[in-house]
Amino acid sequence: MQTKVWSRLMPSPWGNYTVVDLTLPLGPDTIMWPGAPAPSADVAVTVKHDGYFARLVHFFEHSGTHVDAPNHFVEGSAAVTDLPLQSLISPAVMIDASADINGNGDAVLELSTVLAWEEKNGAIPEGSVVLLRTGWEDYYETQPEKYGAGPDGLHFPGFGAEAATYLVETRKVAGIGLDTLGIDRGADADFPVHAHVTLPRNVWHIENLTNLKSLPATGALVFIGVLPLVDGSGSPARILALVPGN
């Protein structure tokens, strides 16, 4: 998938920057979690007959590039409308573990990888969003059966529970995200990170990100354009990163 970027040519109060789109297109060909319906749309009115065009759109809350709210796994907890607004515009930390994972669909982000990243780049700031590049973004179009459910089920990398616990409890991040179908690796049917580490502590997720290869390890600002669905357990979202540059 071609990276979508826009460069701001004129200086702004924040300096010059490039905008990187981290969002997958949302439509009938979107790769979904097994059993979840793909987005669809019915034409409701047309310019020819009604003077304007509009469609009735149907989508699962967890479609495409989307946010998981705490109530996705914790009954009675925060919905997408309850997410703190200040957390939806946050510094982005990008951990590129794609070389270590090297196409291994059963790999997880290890705590040792996070600590090595911090030794090189400094401590992960409180309130930041940690984005994990596993390399799975490269399979979305080229090998959809590897990205989604293959003949032997789901096999994609995710956050390890130990690493996620460190990010949540020690670094106190606002959210985590990655370029796969789920925060937990595909083989983890009990969802250890979803159910026991992040969502119970009101740390939200972004799943199915793309173009993470275009982000620096530090310095970017991420905007999470989540839909304010009443009682929503999640929502498709437009995710944009502002990357500083000359």
Image: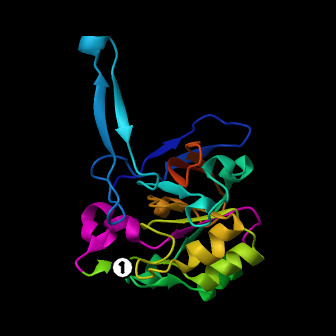
Q: Which residue is mark 1?
A: 155
Residue 212, x across and y down, in percent:
49, 62
Instruction: State left or right for residue 72 relative to residue 201.
Output: left
User: For this rendering, which residue is in front, 162 or 112?
Assistant: 162
Answer above or below: position of 149 versus 238: below
Residue at 43 percent across and 47 percent down: it is 4
Q: Is residue 122 visible?
A: no
Residue drawn 77% across the image and 66% down it: 126
Residue at 45% across, 78% down: 185
> Dot 1: what SS?
loop
- Does residue 197 belong to the magenta stretch? no
Residue 111 image offset from top left, x and y in percent: 62, 86
Where are the magenta residues, as a range? 124-151
Q: Position of residue 107 (x, y in %)?
A: 45, 84
Q: Is residue 72 above or below residue 102?
A: above
Q: Is residue 18 left or right of residue 76?
A: left
